[in-house]
Each structure stands twice: as structure tokens, then as C-alpha cells.
DNA sequence: CGCTTTTTTGAAGATGGTCAATGGGTGTGG
DNA sequence: CCACACCCATTGACCATCTTCAAAAAAGCG
């Protein structure tokens, strides 16, 4: 069984110093586990959650549901992320949250989180910081989907996901689990599924990466990062991987 | 002379209740005024600001500077906004901030803001909430630039700007100041300048809006909102305009 | 009033979307 | 164990849209 509190602690320690009292405060948080099958929604646009989700296993994705029923994916979240921490202060969800592949989330009641913030402001600042990095990732997505070529766009997304996974020790050598379909990639990068396929073929041909069976493999990080114009500064990480 | 503290108080009151002590804490904040001419940078990508800017007059814009020198605008900020409040917790700027037309900003030292958060957590929550709405606006921009037609994209941007301006009482009837060039609109929406012009012509022809001489005029809000698929929910405003 | 910047318009070409068909892999039920 | 069905990936062809390039008109500025 996974230590849920530990997952949060490790995540916050990626950038913030936690005191002994901070650790106690985190360990005091209660939660309920929720297991999700691939594609299942954890919360939907318009709803008002009473708790915040912590990714404990697998991956979650945020998406806007459009009028015509199509989806626009906004971001992907891995173990340790708090993908709907905004719900603590914003009443209604302006987007939905679903499982990308099989996933497990711990739901922590807002009221306990707020109590923790009052008692230990530093923890509030640490989580605030998380939400700010989130925003930086959104900003980068705006630029990615608005100003880059299809090839660069896709390379950038893969670079970001792999880099973040590596920082959180979720990679396996040069590979990582990424149980996402081409259609979902299209809904993320704003391209038609045919283009997604052709673009992936191009990247494969360039020997910089491979993506098959829900597994992303990096073959040449330097080249891939160059193609995707990937500069990890916007992730605001203190402890960057060696690459 | 404008009352800088009042600008911030009014902004926070758009969604948060402030106590008498909160008001005192805000009034205790010191600041330095900075006047910017059109296009001038307030802070650049990579720098580490020591204070946060509050828009006191005019408009500021955030943008990514790309390798090839082109810009991608990320958001626009009006009187009352704190466009770089993220700088309080994130060391380095991952984007730049410039004046859109003539503008005035008040720079408030981070250290005083942090002291205020410790003393009055509720004010921290109010500003945190601001940064979360910011993130929601970024999310909407991802969807806008990735999944909408050129016409819808532009209509949506104009709807958002006008709606936000109206909430902050910055409109003049059906018009607002928007001293932005077509080239900048292109760098915002991810379209070539020729397309920007042709798209604006389309919207003009539809009698839903006009945009000339740095002034945006709404002629038919309902239609424009429909064209842009604009639903203000993501702005998380408590007090919505009558429209 | 002359200069610069911005807007406007036209035409050609590139790019990506749409549509349609094929193939591979997996799971189910007979 | 095989047949079938379904989902997803793959590929090709055509077409619509947007970008690029170029040039003229209009507006802003000293």
C-alpha cells in the first residue's frame, strides 16, 4: 500500500523546505482513496468539489468540454500532483478531470486543507507555489499550441512530460508510461488525428523518440529538446535532472 | 492622483470579503510608481523581481519571447490586476511583462506582501484566488487558440476583455480602450497579421463589434458571445455584469 | 507637411483538416 | 480454437484554410 502522505511530502520537497511541524500537519490530513478506470471522470466541469485530489498512482488529465462535445486537454498530472487544488478557492470547476489510463487519487477535504493553511502558512505557500507552476505550464501550452510547428509542438509535449516524470522518479531509464491515445494527443495539441500520426512518424524517423503501446521512449534527448524548443525553466524546478 | 491602495481593495472586493484589519494591512503596503510608455517592458523573462506590479492605469501584457524573436502574448491585464504576483513565490520570470499603450504600475515589495500574508492569511487567500483565476484564463486561452476557428477565437478574446473591463468598471458604455495593434493580436491568437485583419473585417461585417483606433466597441453582445462561444464561468466572478 | 507605422488588400503556395479505406491487436462469444 | 467485432493506428487523396509575400492605402507623429 502506498503512503499517501509521503507522496505529498516528497512532491512539496521538490521545491520547498518542510519543518517537522509541517510533516505532522500533513500526516494529520485525512483522505479517501478513489480508483479510476481509464477515461473515467473524477470531477466534471460545473461541479463544486468538497475535496482536492492528489494523484497517488497513474495519471490524470484536465480538459475543457466544448459545445460540440469535443475535448481540449489542458494538462496532464502525475503522482504527487494536486490537479484540482484550485477548487479550494474557486467554487465551480471550469474544466473536468479524468483518468489517463488506470489511476488512483486520494481526495483530501478542503476544510482540512484550509485548517492546515491557517496553522502552517508555509505549507500554504508551498501548495500555492504548486498552483503557480501549474499556471506556468498552461502558459507554455498556449505558446506551444499557438506558435510552434506541429513537429515542435509534439516534441515539446513529450519533453515536458518526460522531464517532469524524471524529476518525480517516475521514469524507467529512457522510457515512461504514457497511456494516451493518438486522439487524445490530438485533443491536447490541437491537431487532427491524422496529423498526430504523421507527426509521430516524423519524430520516430528522426530517431529522437518513440511512442508505442502507451510507452514513451526517449532516444536522443538533446535533439528532441532542440526540435521542441524545450527549455525547462518554466517548470521552476530546483533540482533538475542531469540531462 | 489615483489611490493605489483603493485600486487593490476594489479588485479584491470583487470576490472576497475584507475586514477592517485587512484594509489597514493593505494601506500599510508601500509602493513605488512606475510609468511606462507603450511597448516598454516592466520586467523581462529570466529576471528575478523584488516586487509585484499592480496595474494602476492602462494595460499590461504578458508574453513569451521565442527563439526566433517573435512574441506570444499570454494575457492582458487591466487596472487592479497583479500580473506578476507569481513572482512572490517563483524565483525567475518565465515570461516578460510590457505596457500595452501608456500605463502606470505600482511596484509593491515582495517582502511586505509576504509579511502581510503571515499577519492576515485571508488576504493571502484573496490574492491566491486571483492567481487561480489567472490560471483559468490561461486554460481558456489554450482552448481558444487550439480548438476554435479564427473568427470564434477573435470574438472570444474580445468578449473576455470587454467582460473583464466591464466588471472593473473600465468600460465607457459599449466601448473600451484597447490600444493594441493587429500584429499584437496576431501574436496573441496565433494567427498571421493578414488573417487578423480579415477576421476583424468579418466580425465588423457581422455587426457584432468594431475595433478601430485602439477602441473596441460592442455592437451586439449576444451575437458576439455566441460567435466566440464565450461563457464567462471561467472568470469565476461573483458579481457578473447584467448582459 | 513629410515620414513612419499600421492597416488593408491581393495572389500564390504550403500546410493541415477532412474523408475514406485498410490493417493490427484485443477481447468476446460461439 | 476460431470467427467476429471493435477500437485504435495508419495511410492516401483531396480540399479548405491560413501563411507568406508583396504592395498600396490610411493613419499617426514630429
Image (tube, coloured by chain):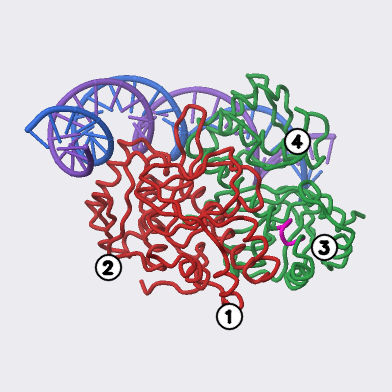
Chain colours: A green, B red, C blue, D purple
The residue labelled by disc 2 is B173
Q: Nearer the viewer, residue A111 or A119?
A: A119
The residue labelled by disc 3 is A33
Q: Which residues are magenta?
A: A123-127
State whether discs 1 and 4 lie on one chain: no
Instruction: Report the disc number at residue A132.
Output: none
Instruction: Report the disc number at residue A240.
Output: 4
**Depth-wise, is mark 3 or mark 4 nearer the camera?**
4
Q: Main secondary structure of the magenta part?
A: helix
Label 2: state its secondary structure. loop
Sequence-first disc among 3 and 4: 3
**Depth-wise, is mark 2 or mark 1 nearer the camera?**
1
**Depth-wise, is mark 1 or mark 4 nearer the camera?**
1
Q: Is residue B33 left or right of residue B89?
A: left
**Depth-wise, is mark 3 or mark 2 nearer the camera?**
2
Distance Cα–Cα, label 3 vs label 2? 51 Å
Distance Cα–Cα, label 3 vs label 4? 31 Å
Crowd band around label 2 with a 10 angstrom C-alpha radius: few (<14), some (14–19), many (20+): few
- 3 and 4 marks in contact (CB < 8 Å): no
Q: Residue at x 83, y 34 (%)?
A: A172
Sequence-first disc among 2 and 1: 1
Distance Cα–Cα, label 1 vs label 4? 44 Å
Label 4: state its secondary structure. loop
- 4 and 2 marks in contact (CB < 8 Å): no
Instruction: Give x and y (percent) for residue B150.
Output: 37, 45
The residue labelled by disc 1 is B20
Q: Is residue A154 left or right of residue A238?
A: left
Q: Residue at x 59, y 23 (%)?
A: A202
Amino acid at each position: 500500500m502506498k503512503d499517501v502522505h509521503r507522496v505529498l511530502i516528497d512532491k512539496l520537497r521538490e521545491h520547498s523546505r518542510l519543518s517537522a511541524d509541517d510533516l505532522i500537519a500533513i500526516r494529520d490530513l485525512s483522505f479517501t482513496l478513489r480508483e479510476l478506470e481509464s477515461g473515467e471522470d473524477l470531477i466534471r466541469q460545473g461541479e463544486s468539489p468538497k475535496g482536492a485530489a492528489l494523484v497517488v498512482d497513474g495519471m490524470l488529465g484536465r480538459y475543457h468540454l466544448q459545445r460540440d462535445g469535443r475535448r481540449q486537454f489542458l494538462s496532464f498530472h502525475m503522482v504527487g500532483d494536486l490537479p484540482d487544488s484550485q477548487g479550494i478557492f474557486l467554487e465551480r470547476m471550469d474544466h473536468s478531470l479524468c483518468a489517463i489510463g488506470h489511476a488512483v487519487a486520494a481526495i483530501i477535504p478542503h476544510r482540512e486543507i484550509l485548517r492546515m493553511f491557517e496553522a502552517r502558512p508555509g505549507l500554504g505557500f508551498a501548495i500555492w507555489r504548486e498552483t503557480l507552476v501549474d499556471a506556468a505550464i498552461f502558459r507554455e501550452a498556449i505558446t506551444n499550441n499557438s506558435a510552434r510547428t506541429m513537429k515542435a509542438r509534439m516534441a515539446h509535449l513529450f519533453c515536458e512530460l518526460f522531464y517532469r516524470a524524471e524529476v518525480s522518479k517516475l521514469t524507467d531509464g529512457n522510457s515512461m508510461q504514457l497511456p494516451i491515445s493518438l486522439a487524445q494527443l490530438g485533443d491536447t495539441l490541437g491537431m487532427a488525428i491524422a496529423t498526430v500520426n504523421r507527426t509521430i512518424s516524423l519524430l520516430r524517423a528522426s530517431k529522437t523518440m518513440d511512442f508505442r503501446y502507451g510507452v514513451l521512449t526517449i532516444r536522443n534527448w538533446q535533439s528532441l529538446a532542440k526540435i521542441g524548443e524545450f527549455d525547462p525553466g518554466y517548470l521552476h524546478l530546483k533540482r533538475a535532472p542531469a540531462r
